[in-house]
Image (tube, helix red, strand yellow):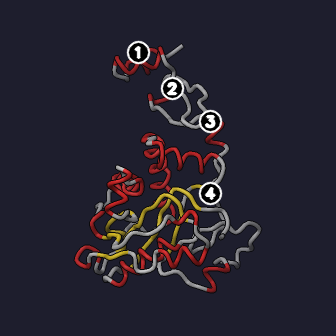
Amino acid sequence: MVHAKLLRRMRPAEAFANLLYPPACLLCRATLPPVPPQGITHPLCRKCLEAMPRCGPPVCQQCGVGLPGAFDAIARCAVCRNNPRVFEMARAPWQYQGPVQDAVRQFKYHRRWRIGRWLAEGMAITAQRSFPLDEVTAVLPVPLHWLARRLRGRHPSADLASAVARSLEKPYVPQALRRSRWTRTQTRLGWRQRFQNVHQAFIAQGPLVRHRSLLLVDDVLTSGATAEACALALKAAGARRVFVLTAARTPLHR
């Protein structure tokens, strides 16, 4: 039975729709409570939430990859020790596997806007806990090529970045970085090919980034090649520091 006080907080049409068609988890389709506590509609069920692996410590202090079984003295993973990153730090709330992988794909490819908003909320919390936000003066997305934006009709990284910027109350500057040439999708490329694919593929706008510390937002961090190429372009244009925030991080370097 829906509590009458909570029901009154909702618009009549929304309340009636929830009574007739109870909300379902956007991943497993399990029925959700018609009106959760505080009247907040959540897109996922408790079972899916509990199955989503978090990016908890210990993690590499630079790229954020998990270091299971590592001692406190191990601050960086082998890849970052051998090839230090251009960006200062990368963090993500979740590991890219299981229900997290499904959630990101539902958002990116099936236009599940509510999942996107929920991912952005988790990302903002991670940013508050991990980055020196008093230094960060702007938030920007990893850009798509203009033709890719036109073909896809949307830009998932920009959706996440704008929501994160609102949550953190930071300026959103999508025009600060652009993709200067078409690149192949990274998902089908090997480790070295990923870095070659995006080499010098971005151009930053100096007046918008010079002497600033920036928060770069994307959906998933795997090799870090795209974030690295973006950070190189931003720093070449005068950015002081670049922090990388994604919804998910692949659990191991590939």
**Helix, strand or loop status at disc 4:** strand
Residue bearing the label numbered 4: 95
Residues tagged 1 and 4 counted as in contact (Cβ below 8 A): no
Residue bearing the label numbered 3: 46
- Give me the C-alpha separation between circle 2 and circle 4: 26 Å
Of labels 3 and 1, earlier in sequence is 1
Considering only vertical position in the picture, is 220 above or below 38? below
- The x and y percentages for residue 47 are 66, 36
Considering only vertical position in the picture, is 46 above or below 144? above
The residue furthest right is 69
* Residue at (47% x, 71% y) in the render: 227
- The x and y percentages for residue 247 are 51, 56
Q: Amino acid at mark 2?
A: Pro
The disc at residue 23 is: 2
Of labels 1 and 2, earlier in sequence is 1
Of labels 4 and 3, earlier in sequence is 3
**Helix, strand or loop status at disc 1:** helix
State which quarter of the image contains the C terminus. Answer: bottom right
- Give me the C-alpha separation between circle 3 and circle 2: 13 Å
The residue furthest left is 207
Q: Amino acid at mark 4?
A: Gln
Label 3 environment density (alpha carbons within 10 Å; few <14, some 14–19, many ≥20): few
Q: Amino acid at mark 3?
A: Arg
Q: Amino acid at mark 1?
A: Phe
Residues tagged 3 and 2 counted as in contact (Cβ below 8 A): no
Residue 92, quarter of picture: bottom right
- Give me the C-alpha separation between circle 1 and circle 2: 12 Å
Residue bearing the label numbered 1: 16
Residues tagged 1 and 2 counted as in contact (Cβ below 8 A): no
